[in-house]
């Protein structure tokens, strides 16, 4: 269970706001890049998550992506370089999100539903309700100002078919623009303050990585 799209958008936006010198569009798309696998008629993702999320033994390996695409030699101010950087940031974010969710699973409210058929539905209902709440309150968020208008993105990774990322951009935009959610929902399994804290702490961790490992001072 990996981070929501709005969580990735929030982290991308905060890194940009802190002064990260990148191509905004490339970086923004990279931050949803690993989630651009599309579901086939048989209900399986193509490419599968083990490919898009560079998994070893069912665990995300951001280092594998870093090495395979030689991020230490990339011009991060170009659209392609910014896409790769955003992709790397996404993988780090998902790893941190999984840590958070594993901690949350120890709570009594989670223990009461773990192992049931409703677990994923109930937990993710809270996650995405918080996404919609955030977007409603932040009309100047990067999703509204930039992401929903992106068109004609060129694929930069060999395992995505031509046009696949563009299709997922449309899917994500339609999801957040057209889905109706109840305004009176009260999250039980994840609180707004926890998401806010996660975003802040994860951005801090990523900033340290980008500064110390890649020399991106911002």
Image: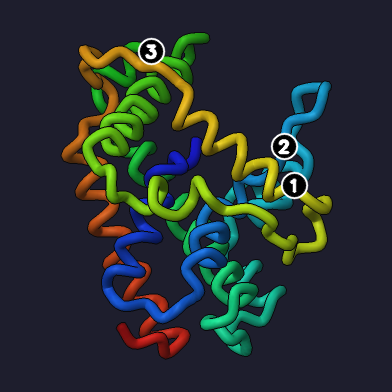
At 27% from the left edge and 37% from the top edge, which residue is drawn?
A: 134
Q: Position of residue 29 (x, y in %)?
A: 56, 57
Residue for badge 3: 113
Q: Earlier in the sequence, mark 1 or mark 3?
A: 3
Towards the viewer: 67 or 186: 186
Q: Is residue 48 visible?
A: yes
* Depth check, front residue: 57 or 61: 61
Q: At numbered mark 3, what does the secondary structure look like: helix, strand or loop? A: loop
Q: Residue at x 30, y 83 (%)?
A: 218
Q: Mark 1 to mark 3: distance in Å?
A: 35 Å
**Between discs 2 and 1, the one toward the N terminus:** 2
Q: Is residue 25 above or below residue 103?
A: below
Instruction: Choose the circle earlier in sequence order: 2 or 3.
Output: 2
Q: Nearer the viewer, mark 2 or mark 3?
A: 2
Residue at the image position 36 percent from the left and 30 percent from the top: 127
- Label 2 environment density (alpha carbons within 10 Å; few <14, some 14–19, many ≥20): some
Q: Image point 38% across, 22% down: which residue? A: 123
Label placed on residue 164? 1
Question: Residue 35: horizontal and vertical position, in percent?
Answer: 60, 45
Using a 10 Å C-alpha cutoff, classify the residue at mark 1 as few (fewer than 14 neighbours), some (14 to 19) or many (20 or more): some
* Tags 2 and 1 touching, CB below 8 Å: yes
Q: Secondary structure at mark 2?
A: strand
* Position in image of residue 3 (x %, y %): 44, 42
């Amino acid at each position: 269970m990996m981070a929501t799209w709005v969580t990735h958008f929030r982290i991308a936006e905060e890194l940009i706001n802190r002064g990260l010198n990148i191509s905004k569009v490339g970086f923004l798309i990279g931050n949803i890049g690993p989630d651009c696998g599309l579901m086939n008629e048989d209900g399986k993702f193509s490419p599968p998550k083990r490919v898009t999320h560079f998994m070893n033994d069912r665990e995300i390996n951001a280092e594998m992506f870093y090495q395979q695409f030689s991020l230490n030699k990339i011009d991060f101010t170009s659209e392609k370089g910014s896409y790769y950087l955003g992709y790397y940031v996404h993988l780090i974010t998902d790893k941190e999100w999984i840590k958070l969710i594993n901690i949350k699973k120890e709570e009594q409210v989670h223990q009461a539903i773990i192992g049931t058929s409703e677990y994923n539905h109930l937990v993710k209902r809270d996650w995405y309700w918080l996404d919609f709440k955030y977007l409603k309150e932040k009309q100047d968020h990067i999703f509204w100002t930039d992401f929903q208008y992106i068109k004609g993105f060129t694929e930069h990774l060999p395992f995505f078919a031509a046009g696949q990322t563009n299709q997922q951009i449309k899917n994500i935009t339609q999801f957040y623009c057209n889905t109706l959610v109840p305004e009176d929902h009260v999250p039980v399994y994840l609180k707004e303050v926890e998401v806010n804290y996660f975003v802040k702490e994860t951005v801090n961790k990523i900033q340290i990585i980008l500064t110390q490992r890649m020399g991106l001072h911002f």
